Image (tube, rainbow, N blue to C red):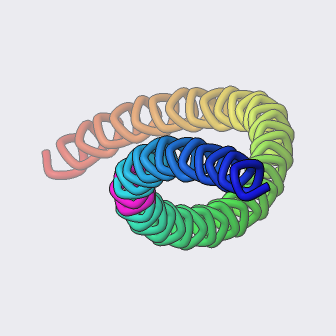
Amino acid sequence: MEEKRLDKMEDMLSTLITLVGSMNDRLEKTQEDVAIIRADQAAMREELNEVKQDLNGVKHDLNDVKQDLSGVKQDLNDVKQDLSGVKQDLNDVKQDLSGVKQDLNDVKQDQTNMKQDIHELKTGHYSLRRDMETRFADIKEILIDIRADQDHVWEKSVKNERAIAKIKAHLQL
């Protein structure tokens, strides 16, 4: 029985050795797996650090984009203000243009009135000229009559003077 027992022990020992060998193989494999996992974990940490660096770069780029966007917003506000100024200037120009149009219409009206006044002056001038020509003709006629009368009076005076001179000459003789 003892032999049976020894056989049984031997079997158990053999099973135990097999189990320990198997566990040793598993342990080695597990250690290899752990080493691989640790290597993978180190690689993942490196990748994680790279991702963090990339993320920091993206954050930095995002901040730059935000600053650029703020600048664009400011530029847009400046453009809006400039546009408002241009609109105001355009409205001022429109008002000035309306004033100029009104002034131009006033000048046209004044010009029309002046043309009418000039036409009336010309008509009055022609009428005055005709009146003056008529008066000149009348005065000329009167002057011609006066000259004729003067010539006639001179002629008579000369005849009378001669007659008086003859009478004086006869009287003195």
Q: Nearer the viewer, residue 34 or 108?
A: 34
Q: Which residue does the image show at 78% across and 37% down from the upper left?
A: 115
Q: Which quadrant: the N terminus? A: bottom right
Is residue 66 placed above or below 151 in the rendered structure?
below
Q: Nearer the viewer, residue 163 or 51?
A: 51
Where is residue 61, by image quadrant? Answer: bottom left
Which secondary structure dominates the residues rendered in magenta? helix
- Indicate whether residue 50 is drawn in magenta: yes
Q: Which residue does the image show at 40% across and 56% down from the upper left?
A: 38
Kindly tell me whether residue 121 is visible in this rendering. Answer: no
Q: Nearer the viewer, residue 71 or 35?
A: 35
Q: Would you say 3 lies left or right of 57 here?
A: right
Q: Which quadrant: the C terminus? A: top left
The magenta region covers 43-51
Q: Which residue does the image show at 68% across and 44% down from the upper left?
A: 11
Q: Residue 131, image x and y in percent?
A: 79, 36
Q: Residue 39, image x and y in percent?
A: 35, 50
Q: Residue furthest front?
A: 1
Q: Which residue does the image show at 44% across and 59% down from the upper left?
A: 48
Q: Would you say 18 lies left or right of 28 here?
A: right
Q: Nearer the viewer, residue 158 or 44?
A: 44
